[in-house]
Image (tube, grey):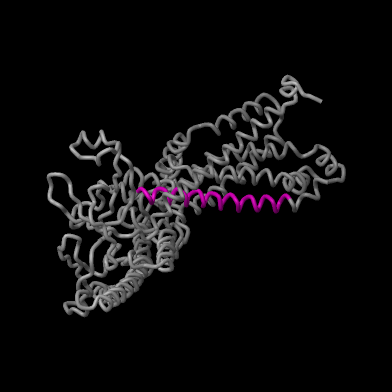
């Protein structure tokens, strides 16, 4: 039977195909975006080849250039001619390459745009080295002499392999010593400093209470002396480590032949990408990826890792979920199960729905004014007067950031939970009450278990939104660099008053506040991809819990 166009439209088939097409396009766009971010970010960890060439511009002397290709683009010929540069005959555009030349301490900048057709005699020297440093970015050149103190133990111009092996051994030794130094400074000396500060606050508290007796003075002095003794022992050990850490030096030649002497202690890793095979490059790639995930940032966040930002993001989201879930569930239960369904209830529901559309920065301003200045200031006056005028909770921190985001996502949890409660058949409640159960028993043992998947749906939506928020966090707790994690071995272990790092703010800071934009660009993509993965993992964890609850209480629905 032939179907006319009018009947086909009435059947609704066009709208089904239209919706299917829209969903397919959305999925393709999301997958394409993730692939684009991954390609731009993950390539940063691959050891790119070092190219060496002669660079000759018309009317200028030929210079040597060396570095790794960071990016390339096609430039119209007209644009180049306007600034006095030539273009190969017959071409309407020319390739321009962004070369990471490094050696910022020598040249003043570590990136340079060059025209591909002006590069001559390109080579990829096997002995060319790339040195990642704690400061001044990468160094590209050739290894010279390896020194132990003032004594030369190897010379690459005499025996390159022996010099390279000795250089690698010194780097490994320096990295081990650096780890020992960080352990002492961050953990052991950090704990002593924290203990000394607690003694200072305790003494000031006694003074404010007029309770600083001679006996308490003696106790405080004894405790302080014990901590000072521990500090002196650690300081002696630290001085020995620094002496050993700064012992070794090496010389290197940059592409123009200038010899530079550098400290091995400033080297993170050194490698020869042009001499590396596939297995070596794969090992290097995963080593860099591990550093990105597990290390602290360095070089104004443009190098190193983002572990503190990962930790801060996950911890803040967990605290937010712990706060928002009970509040949202209680509010939804009251509105659906206890409140009289009248004008005021409808107004409250409208207000809750409207709160979901309020810009997040407004919540940040509210959190700064109410939670930080008013509530935090009051807490300081009541419970931490000994620390004043330095604020404890009267300043931005992890607690206020979590509460602000809990307030921001509260409408989502309320709406999702209330919809879940509304879907529970009335006969389930009436059957429970008919069997003699009280309203509370019916609510806690029948209604809430059946609505728990809807509650988890609200939590999933809240986590997805909160993990990616940046604007309110800039006002209530997030910082560019936090020296210590908010969860550590110092009492009370979880420091809710401490500022923290966040992946979203890290992306903003690296992308828009970095002094070295070109170096920061691949890290922006890599961190953005990591943030998506973290949010996905948090959501998948909540979805797994929701599915478990759905299976567990499925029998109640039958």
Residue placed farthest to the front in the image? 90
Quadrant (top left, top right, bottom left, bottom right) of the N terminus: top right
Q: Where does the image place residue 549, in percent across and percent down from the top left?
A: 71, 51
Residue placed farthest to the right in the image? 435
**Image check: 554 left or right of 380?**
right
Residue 340 visible, this angle: yes
Q: As rendered, which of 196 and 170 lies closer to the eye?
A: 170
**Image check: 488 left or right of 409?**
left
Q: Where does the image place residue 162, in percent across and percent down from the top left?
A: 27, 79
**Image check: 426 left or right of 191?**
right
**Is 533 inside the magenta-drawn segment?**
yes
Res. 17 image quadrant:
top right
Q: Where does the image place residue 39, in percent across and percent down from the top left?
A: 44, 50
Residue 211 visible, this angle: no
**Most prominent secondary structure in the magenta stretch?**
helix
Q: Is residue 278 above or below residue 522?
A: below
Residue in the picture at 39% in, 59% down = 46
Residue in the picture at 33% in, 64% down = 274
Res. 65 image quadrant:
bottom left
**Is 123 inside the magenta-drawn segment?**
no
- Number of marks in the rendered image: 0
Residue in the picture at 76% in, 39% down = 424
Q: Which residues are magenta?
A: 521-550
Q: As rendered, which of 112 and 309 lies closer to the eye?
A: 112
Q: Where does the image place residue 167, in percent across and percent down from the top left?
A: 27, 74
């Amino acid at each position: 039977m032939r179907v006319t166009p009018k009947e086909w439209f009435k059947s609704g088939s066009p709208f089904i195909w239209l919706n299917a097409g829209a969903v397919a396009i959305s999925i393709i766009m999301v997958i394409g975006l993730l692939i684009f971010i991954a390609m731009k970010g993950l390539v940063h960890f691959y050891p790119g080849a070092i190219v060496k060439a002669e660079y000759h511009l018309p009317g200028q002397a030929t210079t040597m250039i060396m570095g790794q290709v960071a990016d390339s683009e096609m430039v119209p010929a007209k644009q180049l001619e306007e600034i006095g540069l030539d273009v190969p005959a017959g071409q309407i555009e020319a390739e321009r390459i962004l070369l990471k030349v490094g050696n910022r301490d020598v040249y003043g900048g570590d990136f340079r745009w060059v025209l591909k057709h002006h590069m001559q005699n390109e080579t990829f020297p096997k002995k060319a080295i790339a040195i990642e440093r704690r400061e001044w970015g990468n160094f590209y050149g050739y290894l010279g002499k390896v020194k132990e103190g003032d004594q030369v133990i190897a010379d690459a111009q005499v025996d390159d392999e022996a010099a390279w092996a000795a250089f690698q051994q010194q780097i490994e030794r320096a990295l081990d010593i650096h780890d020992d130094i960080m352990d002492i400074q961050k953990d052991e000396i950090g704990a002593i400093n924290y203990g000394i500060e607690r003694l200072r606050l305790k003494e000031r508290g006694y003074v404010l209470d007029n309770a600083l007796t001679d006996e308490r003075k003696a106790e405080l002095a004894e405790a302080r002396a014990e901590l000072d003794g521990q500090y002196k022992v650690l300081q002696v050990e630290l001085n020995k480590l620094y002496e050993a850490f700064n012992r070794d030096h090496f010389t290197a030649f940059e592409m123009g032949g200038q010899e530079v002497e550098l400290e091995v202690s400033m080297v993170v890793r050194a490698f020869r990408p042009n001499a590396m095979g596939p297995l070596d490059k794969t090992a290097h790639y995963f080593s860099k990826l591990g550093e990105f995930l597990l290390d602290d940032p360095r070089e104004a966040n443009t190098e190193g890792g983002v572990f503190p930002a990962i930790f801060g993001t996950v911890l803040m989201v967990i605290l937010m979920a712990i706060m928002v879930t009970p509040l949202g569930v209680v509010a939804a239960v009251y509105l659906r199960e206890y409140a009289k369904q009248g004008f005021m209830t409808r107004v409250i529901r409208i207000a809750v729905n409207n709160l979901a559309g309020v810009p997040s920065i407004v919540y940040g301003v509210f959190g700064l004014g109410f939670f930080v200045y008013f509530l935090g200031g009051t807490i300081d006056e009541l419970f931490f007067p000994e620390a004043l005028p330095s604020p404890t909770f009267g300043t931005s921190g992890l607690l206020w950031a979590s509460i602000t985001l809990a307030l921001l996502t509260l409408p989502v949890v309320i709406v999702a939970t209330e919809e879940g409660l509304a879907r529970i058949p009335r006969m389930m409640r009436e059957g429970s009450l008919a069997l003699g159960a009280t309203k509370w028993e019916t609510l806690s043992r029948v209604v809430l278990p059946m609505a728990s998947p809807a509650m988890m749906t609200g939590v999933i939506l809240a986590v997805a939104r909160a993990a990616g928020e940046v604007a309110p966090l800039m006002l209530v707790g997030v910082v560019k660099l936090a020296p210590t994690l908010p969860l550590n071995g110092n009492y009370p272990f979880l420091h809710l008053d401490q500022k923290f790092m966040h992946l979203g703010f890290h992306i903003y800071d690296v992308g828009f506040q970095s002094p070295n934009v070109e170096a920061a660009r691949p890290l922006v993509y890599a961190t953005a991809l990591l943030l998506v993965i973290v949010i996905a993992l948090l959501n998948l964890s909540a979805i797994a819990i929701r599915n478990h609850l759905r299976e567990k209480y499925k029998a109640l629905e039958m």
